[in-house]
Image (tube, helix red, strand yellow):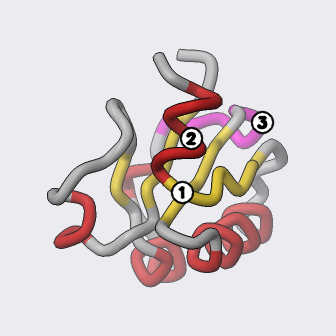
């Protein structure tokens, strides 16, 4: 896989529809630590998205503070699907 897509919406939003292959990690889970990032190299391209880009921007900053160096705010599901469709 060339990149990892993280949907930072709440699980109830995620089950209503998400980008194919996206991992669901809400900001609160990122801040509290998650094993969902295990095995993802710090330089792996990561695209985060939510509904409006607000939570994904916060999550981008959290990931960068965790040492991830290639994080993009994908804004929302539609934008990510249009730009990164698999």
Secondary structure, mark 2, is helix
Q: Check if mark 1's residue and mark 2's residue have beta carbons within 8 Å.
A: yes
Q: Residue at x 77, y 36 (%)?
A: 43
Q: Tag 1, which secondary structure?
A: strand
Q: Quadrant of residue 19?
A: top left
Q: Nearer the viewer, residue 38 or 83?
A: 83
**Does the magenta stretch mainly form a helix, a strand or a loop?**
loop
Could you tell me which residue is drawn at 63 percent across and 69 percent down?
A: 53
Residue named by callout 1: 76
Q: Residue at x 63, y 78 (%)?
A: 54
- What is the quadrant of residue 26 in the picture? bottom left
Mark 3 or mark 1, which has the lower sequence index? Answer: 3
Give the residue number, with chain letter if any, for mark 2: 80
Which image quarter: residue 52? bottom right
Residue count near mark 3 (Cα–Cα under 10 Å), binned few <14, some 14–19, many ≥20: few
* Segment tinted magenta in the rendering: 39-44
Q: Measuring from the top left, give residue 25's x and y in whole percent.
A: 40, 63
Q: Determine which residue is flagged by label 3.
A: 43
């Amino acid at each position: 896989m060339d990149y990892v897509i993280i949907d930072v919406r709440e699980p109830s939003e995620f089950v209503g529809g998400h980008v194919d292959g996206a991992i669901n990690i809400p900001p609160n889970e990122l801040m509290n630590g998650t094993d969902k990032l295990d095995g993802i190299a710090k330089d792996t391209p990561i695209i985060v998205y939510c509904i409006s880009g607000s939570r994904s921007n916060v999550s981008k900053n959290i990931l960068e503070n965790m040492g991830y160096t290639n994080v993009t705010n994908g804004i929302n599901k539609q934008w990510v699907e249009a730009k990164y469709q698999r």
